[in-house]
Image (cartoon, rainbow, N blue to C red):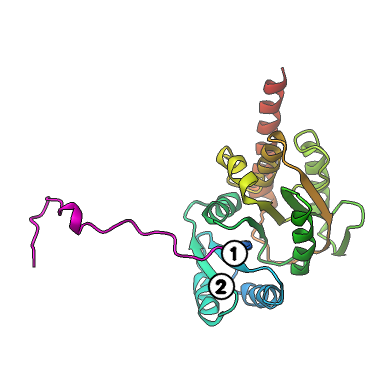
Amino acid sequence: MLVHLRGQRPPASERRAPARETRPTVDLEVVIPAYNEASRLPNTLHRTVDFLREQSWSSRVVVVDNGSSDGTADVVRAFGAASDDVPVELVGCARPGKGAAVRRGLLRSRSRFVGFFDADLATPVETLSTVMEHFAAGAAAVVGSRHAPGARFVQHQPAARQLGGTVFRAMTRRLVDGVHDTQCGFKFFERAALVPALATCRTTGFAFDVELLRNLQRAGAEIVEVPVAWSHATGSSFSPLRDGVSAFRTVLQLQRVAGRSVS
């Protein structure tokens, strides 16, 4: 057995080759960003996997743990070990912010179609059938909407959140043309169109969606907005004071940048 002195590199013939991607490619990869979601994830994962295993297209679920302290990672590992037909994987993201977690999950994918929805499953997982139909028709991005014609609220948000949402939508109209609802946590993409748009995203918080959709539109990608039956869920990690103010500030910055590019 050869012994190499400390500080000396072993010969090339003995160096290990870099680890390669061994995950099989699937048709659709579902990313779920999660911050302290140990109580909600079991139901969400059960419903998601039960639906996906019945579809004609292959799929994978990837949960991105955004620095949780409540056992979220343990929940995902246990579920993944018991799921044979639809893989469920755990990815860590040390950088705080929903946008950072979503970005990490999306960039990690090698599947043709990839997207994300929230851990509270506010939009029914069955909406994915409509998503795949639009992809088959050539769409580059399919996003859920609570405000497009045909959408409905099964359970409404508190009044303060509704008011904030109304103001936020008004601010984003000039940034993302023709999209009624940039903040519905249900968005899926063709990866070939997504990756270039992600490359220039700098937002890590809840306004990440606005910047991503704007980048897609500027690149000429078709965004299809589908109406959803949406239910507000309590226990969200979103803080109107912390996250809401940050999101408004980010949109104002994006508006300034957009104004400079036009002038």
Residue in the picture at 78% in, 55% down: 134
Q: Which is more N-terminal, label 1 or label 2?
A: 1
Q: Position of residue 253 (x, y in %)?
A: 66, 32
Q: Which mark is residue 26?
A: 1
Mark 2 sits on what residue? 87
Q: Which residues are magenta?
A: 1-25
* Residue 10 magenta-highlighted: yes
Residue positioned most to the bottom: 82
Residue in the picture at 71% in, 73% down: 55
Q: Is residue 131 left or right of residue 16?
A: right
Specify the quadrant of the image occupied by residue 184.
bottom right
Q: Which mark is residue 70?
A: none
Q: Position of residue 37 (x, y in %)?
A: 60, 68
What quarter of the picture does the N terminus occupy? Answer: bottom left
Nearer the observer, 14 or 8? 14
Residue 120 lies, with reference to residue 189, above or below; the image says below
